[in-house]
Image (cartoon, rainbow, N blue to C red):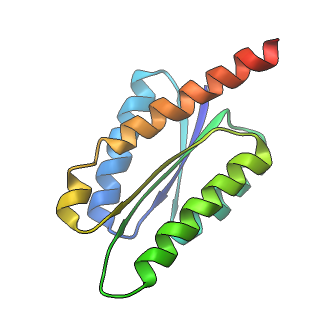
Amino acid sequence: MRLGIVASRFNEEICAKLLERARAQAEKLNAQCTVVSVAGALEIPLALQWMAQSGRFDALVALGAVIRGDTYHFEVVANESARGVMEVMLDFGLPIANGILTTDDEAQANARLEKGAEAVRVALEMAKLKGRIHEG
């Protein structure tokens, strides 16, 4: 399986841990993994689109961390990044697991670091399902 991961650098410590767990899971599942880095969660869908357009991947994973602040910006970033991920998935018919954490604080994000590994498992599971469905 050829897996692409788009990882945000915003909230860098948390995102690095998500990516570490995702890479370890990909290795455990024998997936060939390509990682690209983007500034933040809003940039993830565009990088996913470019990866999907390349035709080089069986599945993709989005990794990031959006932590609530004092402004409405949290809702915008959380909602629009999720919408963008979903649009790319449906437009290309390519499995994309959304591992973008949306939490109230860093403690909640740190408690959910296994979502990186989970996203890899889900993406690969969906890629296998797609293969079975298309085999007929």
Q: Residue at x 50, y 32 (%)?
A: 122
Q: Residue at x 20, y 50 (%)?
A: 111
Q: Where residue 32 appears, x then y in whole percent?
A: 55, 30
Image quadrant in which the C terminus is located: top right
Q: Where residue 101 appears, x then y in whole percent?
A: 38, 57
- From the viewer's perspective, is 135 left or right of 131? right
Q: Of residues 116 and 107, which is closer to you in this image? A: 107
Question: So how many labels did they put on this image?
Answer: 0
Q: Residue at x 46, y 30 (%)?
A: 121
Residue 88, compared with residue 40, is above or below; it is above
The answer to whether one can see residue 47 in this image is yes
Query: Among all residues in the image, which is located at the extreme top?
Result: 136
Q: Where residue 77 appears, x then y in whole percent?
A: 49, 73
Residue 107, compared with residue 129, is above or below; it is below
Query: Which image quadrant for residue 133?
Result: top right
- From the viewer's perspective, is 108 left or right of 60? left
Q: Residue at x 65, y 21 (%)?
A: 129
Q: Where residue 130 appears, x then y in whole percent?
A: 70, 25
